[in-house]
Amino acid sequence: MFLREALVRLERKDSYMSKVAVVFWSGTGNTTAMAQAVEEGAKSAGAEVSVFGPSEFNSGMVKDYDGIAFGCPAMGAEVLEETEYEPMFTDVESALSGKKIALFGSYGWGDGQWMRDWEERANAVGANLVYDCVMANNFPSDDDLEECKSLGRALV
Ligand SMILES: Cc1cc2nc3c(=O)[nH]c(=O)nc-3n(C[C@H](O)[C@H](O)[C@H](O)COP(=O)(O)O)c2cc1C
């Protein structure tokens, strides 16, 4: 009897697939390329991956995922995209305490201030940043894309 229960538990554990969400916004496609690499990395590590735009994700969905990758380029003056992404992240951040997350995004002429501010915000709410933030200058290089894949794997 005990053995059977132990086997059932083992089977359940084996069949458990880690769930990863990739929540991103992109205006001209640079952050989209990064998001695709994040997705690829997480899938290669065995996760079931769901990809969302900012209007499709909210704080109530955080509990459904083991890890969440957030992606947004530098917009405005070193801020997140203000119409959809910023309101979504404001809603979600209160639910991120202890959650495995990672941040990524593309930038242009700045020095990455938007990402430093975003990381600080995530740390302030107690999120578990499992990978260094990945920033790509305009379109991601091959090295940037490899970093994005590693970021995706780290969330699994
Ligand atoms: C309205 C607007 C504001 C931007 N503001 C910044 C900025 O503050 N700092 C920066 O480094 N790049 C800024 N950029 C450049 C974008 O971050 C850059 O083009 C990025 O690659 C866009 O990524 P995407 O293709 O995923 O939209 C801005 C671009 C636009 C269109």
Image: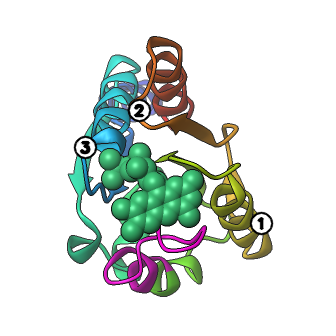
> From what the image shows, is residue 3 above or below residue 116?
above
Residue at 60% from the left image edge and 67% from the top image edge? 78
The mark nearer the N terminus, 2 or 1, is: 2
Closer to the chain start, of discs 2 and 3, is 2
Helix, strand or loop for the magenta stretch, by majority: loop
Percent position (x, y) of residue 133?
A: 64, 43
SS for dot 1: helix
Q: Position of residue 80 (x, y in %)?
A: 49, 70
Residue positioned 52% across, 35% down in the render: 136
- Where does the magenta region start and end? 75-89
The residue nearer to you, when weighing 109 against 11, is 109
Quadrant housing residue 26: bottom left
Residue 100: image location, x then y, percent: 59, 51
Residue position marked by numbered label 3 in the rendering: 29
Closer to viewer: mark 2 or mark 1: 1
Give how far apart the Cα atoms at labels 2 and 3 are.
Answer: 38 Å
Q: Residue at x 25, y 43 (%)?
A: 29
